[in-house]
């Protein structure tokens, strides 16, 4: 598990360097440790090394790990595909959701978010390349969904998220990262409050930071291959 500590240290250094290279010194980028298919022990080791934000894709797996790790002061992010029958546990147990892509899901998350918790922070997942196998809303639909989310008292619109085609990372996705940032700026100019961009993964997070990312989602570069750690 010392490998996790070393890997986290290296990621933090690379994030800092990428910020400097982009003349973004002093700005904050959340490093989200994507712990899908990783054990609760691996998450605990990362937490002990100072990592606080963790991302999970599968609700049942995530709940089991949360139950084992109570009391660790972890911020849990849901980054998987959302089935409408899973909105209650997501709204009750996570602090952030990166993959909201339709009104029905937003409304259900709002309905299920307990009044005792702060509003659920949500990103709209944008499907920029029209990939039918991927989730995400078409860019033309983002403004309407953003306004709907803004009107929900139990939701807080953080910003936009994308999972671009893995076209020759690290640079191949720069065009999608640029476009997501432009979309964010355009909607802000139209009066929609949001300030976050969830973009960049292990293979291309430095490119994403150069394009304005404020949250990078990193799995294998922190925990190693998921195939080595089944379940
Ligand atoms: C798995 C996953 C990641 C992390 O991918 P790595 O290449 O392992 O860094 C990031 N975002 C989403 C939505 C994922 O499903």
Image (tube, rainbow, N blue to C red):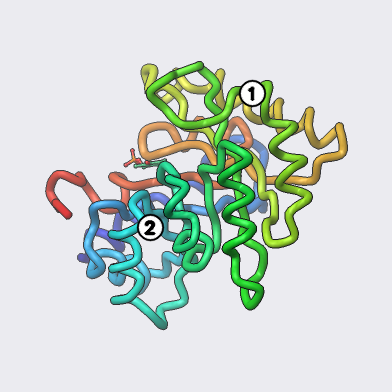
SS class, disc 2: helix
Foreground tag (2 vs 1): 1
The relative height of residue 118 versus residue 86 in the rendered view (above or below) is below
* Viewer can see residue 144: yes
User: Is the CB of the residue bearing disc 1 within 8 angstroms of ligand 1?
Assistant: no
User: Which one is nearer the viewer's eye here, 33 or 155?
Assistant: 155
Give percent across and percent down for residue 93. 47, 67
Q: Secondary structure at mark 1?
A: helix
Residue found 47% across the figure and 59% down from its top: 90
Q: Residue at x 60, y 71 (%)?
A: 114
In the rendered view, does 34 fall on the left or right side of 213?
left
Q: Marks 2 and 1, Cα distance to the nearest angstrom?
A: 35 Å
The answer to whether the residues at label 2 and label 1 have Cβ atoms under 8 Å apart is no
The residue lying at 64 percent from left, 23 percent from top is 139
Up-down relation of residue 4 to residue 116 (above or below) = above
Q: Is residue 20 visible?
A: no
Foreground pick, 46 / 63: 63
Q: Residues within 10 Å of mark 1 (few under 14, many from 20)?
A: some
On-image quarter of the C terminus: bottom left
Question: For the point 30% across and 65% down, which residue is it?
Answer: 43
Question: What is the crowding at mark 2: few (fewer than 14 residues within 10 Å), some, or many (at least 20)?
Answer: some
The residue closer to the viewer here, 10 or 143, is 143
User: Which one is in front, 4 or 184?
Assistant: 184
Residue 43 sits above or below residue 175 on the image:
below
The disc, 2 or 1, on the residue closer to the chain's N-terminal end is 2
For this orientation, the residue located farthest to the bottom is 71
Residue that numbered label 2 is attached to? 9
Quadrant in which ligand 1 is drawn: top left
In percent of width and height, residue 70 lies at 38, 79
Left or right of residue 48, residue 148 in this image: right
State the residue position of label 1: 139
């Amino acid at each position: 598990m010392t490998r996790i500590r070393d890997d986290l240290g290296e990621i933090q250094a690379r994030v800092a360097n990428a910020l400097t290279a982009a003349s973004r010194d002093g700005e904050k980028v959340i490093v989200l440790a994507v712990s899908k298919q990783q054990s609760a022990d691996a998450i605990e080791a990362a937490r002990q090394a100072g990592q606080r934000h963790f991302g999970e894709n599968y609700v049942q797996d995530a709940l089991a790990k949360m139950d084992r790790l109570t009391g660790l002061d972890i911020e849990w992010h849901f980054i998987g595909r959302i089935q409408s029958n899973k909105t209650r546990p997501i709204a009750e147990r996570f602090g952030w959701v990166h993959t909201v892509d339709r009104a029905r899901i937003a409304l259900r998350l709002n309905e299920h978010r307990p009044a005792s918790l702060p509003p659920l922070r949500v990103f709209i997942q944008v499907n920029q390349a029209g990939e039918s196998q991927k989730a995400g809303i078409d860019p033309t639909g983002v403004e309407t969904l953003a306004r709907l989310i803004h009107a929900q008292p139990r939701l807080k619109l953080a910003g936009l998220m994308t999972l671009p085609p893995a076209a020759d990372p690290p640079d191949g996705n720069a065009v999608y990262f640029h476009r997501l940032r432009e979309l964010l700026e355009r909607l802000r100019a139209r009066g929609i409050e949001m300030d976050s961009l969830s973009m960049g993964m292990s293979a291309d997070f430095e490119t994403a930071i150069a394009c304005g990312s404020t949250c990078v989602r990193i799995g294998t570069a922190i925990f190693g291959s998921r195939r080595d750690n089944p379940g």
